[in-house]
Amino acid sequence: MNQDIEIEDLLEDLVTFRRDIHANPELAYKEVKTAEKVADSLREIGLDVTTGVGKTGVVGSLKVGNSSRSIGLRADMDALPIVEETGLPYASCHHGVFHGCGHDGHTTMLLGAAQHLARTRNFDGTVHFIFQPAEEGEAGAKAMIDDGLFERFPCDRVYAFHNWPDLPAGTISTRCGPIMAAADKFSIQVKGKGGHAAVPHQTPDAILAASELVSQLNTIVSRRISPTSTAVLSVTQISGGNSHNVLPSSVSLTGTVRTFDPHVQDLIEAAVRQVITGVSVATGTQISIDYQRYYPATINASVAAEHALMVAKRVGNAVEAPEAAFTSEDFAFMLQACEGAYVWLGQGTSGEHIPLHHPGYDFNDGIIATGVKLHVALVEDFLPSNSG
């Protein structure tokens, strides 16, 4: 029986598994039932299973042969705090929690690869199947690393996939170097004194100061960062005031910064703080900021990215990504700790384009087989069997 037929035999059960997870989503660090389902499935096929890694993470390990070499394959398990609007028969049973990024599909594809590899055993070495919690802004990758992931489960190389609606279904893409941006977030509090809107000269105007901040912050990238560098700064929320005739005592702003170069990241943070100081002095307000760098840039090792593209050409349509994306990914922490690469798997269809994190999004079950095959091919190529 050839590989394609064997993987096709798994698909019906895998689709059922994926849709069950979709119907029962869990948020970051609450993936208790999802982790149990994954762990039980891995035990059923004979893997050594460790639970509770990074709170709710699961690692299944499969060793074949005598080689000391090893590879890690990572999938994320958490859902998003979004109200689903798909109308699907397997839609979320938990209002306000939704697999709107396809992590249900990622988990399923990795489980399928584990099932296939446990049956065929056509490699020599160790595969660690890493099922990670809390990718959506809560740094589950870092939590697993801090819990000794790579000391307890050493990997010579690590890979992760993400479905990509912008690419045709089944197309595989990655690139050397940066592929996803670093993500910073900032929260700014502007404090005036508050007072009657008819006598604005009697109180520092927090609304005016906040407006000046928005204007000046949006000039940082265009006027302080080299045109040859790449960055985005966006103010995404502003809140303050309750009445037409009252100047509020405080206004809050939040936003995000996306970059690929740590030096540019430093320049932008410094400029944000300088703008805040200047506006505070000019307007007589008190302004404070909480600035957090929560995910670093996702940087692929060239050798790992090139290997992924080479292997992908045997699986489907493989193309080198022409540019990085400004979205972020906590797999970046794993790539700081271990050589590896992040890979996009196209899931776009000829119908309406629905992006990630949209309430109408659903993972395309038609690409499960491609994802399983790519996982398997990476393992078999990186850990070649002596008998193969």
Image (cartoon, grey):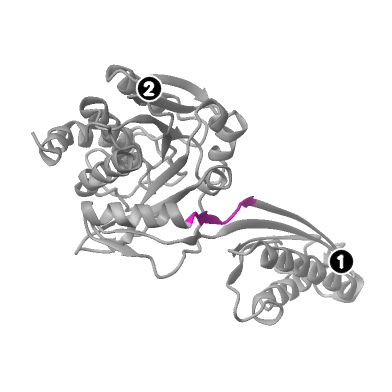
Q: Amino acid at mark 1?
A: Thr
Residue 129 on image: x %, y %? 39, 32
The quadrant where residue 273 appears: bottom right
Q: Is residue 359 visible?
A: no
The quadrant where residue 16 appears: top left
**Label 2 sits on residue:** 39
Q: Is residue 202 left or right of residue 144?
A: right
Q: Is residue 33 left or right of residue 181?
A: left
Packing grade of label 2 (10 A; few <14, some 14-19, many >=20) is many
Q: Is residue 377 visible?
A: yes
Packing grade of label 1 (10 A; few <14, some 14-19, many >=20) is many
Q: Nearer the viewer, residue 64 or 186?
A: 64
Q: Is residue 297 magenta?
A: yes
| Whether residue 125 is situated above or below residue 177 in the rendered picture | above
Task: Please state, as top left, top right, bottom left or bottom right, where the C terminus lies in the image.
Answer: top left
Q: Nearer the viewer, residue 74 or 157?
A: 157
| Whether residue 346 is situated above or below residue 81 in the rendered picture | below
Dominant secondary structure, magenta: strand
The quadrant where residue 64 appears: top left
**Label 1 sits on residue:** 285
Outermost residue toward the front? Answer: 386
Helix, strand or loop under label 1? loop
Q: Which mark is residue 139?
A: none
Instruction: Write the residue at 37% across / 24% down.
Output: 66
Q: Amino acid at mark 2?
A: Ala
Q: Nearer the viewer, mark 2 or mark 1?
A: 2
Q: Is residue 191 magenta?
A: no
Look at the image and give the residue range highlighted in magenta: 294-301
